[in-house]
Image: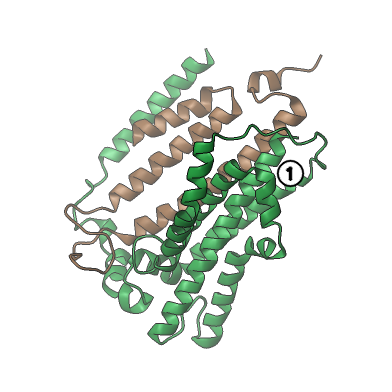
Chain colours: A green, B brown
Amino acid sequence: MRSALALVLVVVLAALMMAGVSQLPPPGEADQAVHRHVAANYLADGVEEGGTGNRVTAVLLDYRALDTYGEVVVIFAALIAVLLVRSAGGPRTQPPPRRVPVSPVVDQVIRLMTPFIALFALFMIIEGHVLPGGGFQGGVVLGALMILLSLALGPDRLRGALHTGALFWLRAVAPLAFTVSALAGLGLVGWWFALPEPGWMREFALVLLELAIGFGGAAALTGFFLSLEEDIHR
Amino acid sequence: MVVLFAVGLYIVLTSQNLLKKIIGLNIMETSVFGLIVTSGMVDGGSPPLLGRGLEAPYASPVTHALVLTGIVVALSVTALALVLIVRVKRECGSIELDELLEPEE
């Protein structure tokens, strides 16, 4: 009964949305509204104003830096909430479960691949302002590497290796870096999130921001995974 | 994209399992991201980068940045929901909605 009602509702809604979407301009035509106005301006001036050949990065870190600031704050807030929910559950009561060791093939392959994955993640973060990639993408690769290592070595060994004061601050590095960038832009150039002139300083600032986003994102992802893992075995 | 959205919404509405509801939510999000990012592409266009062989027309960088932000928010929501589900399981012993909503004897 309930699922039949839901089916009717979904079908009616889908028909309405289909009617709406079919009225949208067809994708792929260069003279549609999506490609005029701001997008055209970003494409025309993004290289000079944003200081980077990657116009997506120019939008993210220069034109709409305020939105990206909100974005990193969202990740940070989610991480805080996850840690709060976990710590509200009290300390671990059961002993940690005995781990089933992964197969030696998986273990060896993960160990073998780790440096290459880490290198690729760093490359994506550092070259992200000129090539496809960027802080978020590289950060996700780095976070996935941490999850992979946690599966191969066991979460407790990873936790032990990562349990440093630096990691604690790494979780907050992206919001902090954006705050510094906003204030520095206000102080040095005159408006919030402005990137400093000349070009090489601008590029340096972009790389620093991308590094902060990348490592902050990776730390958040690792934090999500480790607290989930700990929570499940409690 | 509409079909994908409808599938996700149907899962969210009918599934009794909280975990499956989250999966449905993610399917819905994916459909929206796909719609936005396809609206920004151009036939025969190149990615909005500088480089050899890349020239106008470029795909719109705005939709890319928009979807990137959306994905990050979706990831944060999913992570928080998963932790809350684990908590519900520990406190109430189930993640099936019909079992959770039953009055306690």
Residue A69 left/right relative to A36: right
Q: Which chain carries label 1?
A: A
Is residue A108 visible to us here? yes
Q: Nearer the viewer, residue A180 or A45?
A: A180
Percent across and percent down for residue A85 are: 73, 44
Q: Is residue A119 above or below residue A103?
A: below
Q: Quadrant of the N terminus of chain B?
A: top left
Residue A179: percent from the left, percent from the top? 59, 72
Q: Quadrant of residue A102?
A: top right
Image quarter of the C terminus of chain B? top right
Residue drawn at the location 46% of the way across and 26% of the way down:
B10
* Residue A232, x across and y down, in percent: 69, 35
Q: Mark 1 points at which residue?
A: A86
Q: Is residue A192 left or right of residue A101?
A: left
Tell me the residue at 28%/57% (across/down). Answer: A34
Residue A70 in sight: no
Q: What residue type is labelled 1?
A: Arg
State whether residue A195 is above or below residue A58.
below
User: Residue at image x 26%, y 72%?
Assistant: A44
Q: Residue at x 32, y 73 (%)?
A: A46
A8 is higher (above) or lower (below) than A148: above
Mark 1: which secondary structure?
A: helix
Query: Can you give x and y, in whole percent of width and height, for residue B36 in the image?
Result: 35, 48
Q: In this view, does A196 lie to the left or right of A103?
A: left
Total number of numbered discs in the rendering: 1
Q: Residues within 10 Å of mark 1 (few under 14, many from 20)?
A: some
Seen from the viewer's position, the closer of residues A52 and A146 is A146
Question: From what the image shows, is residue B77 above or below residue B15?
Answer: below
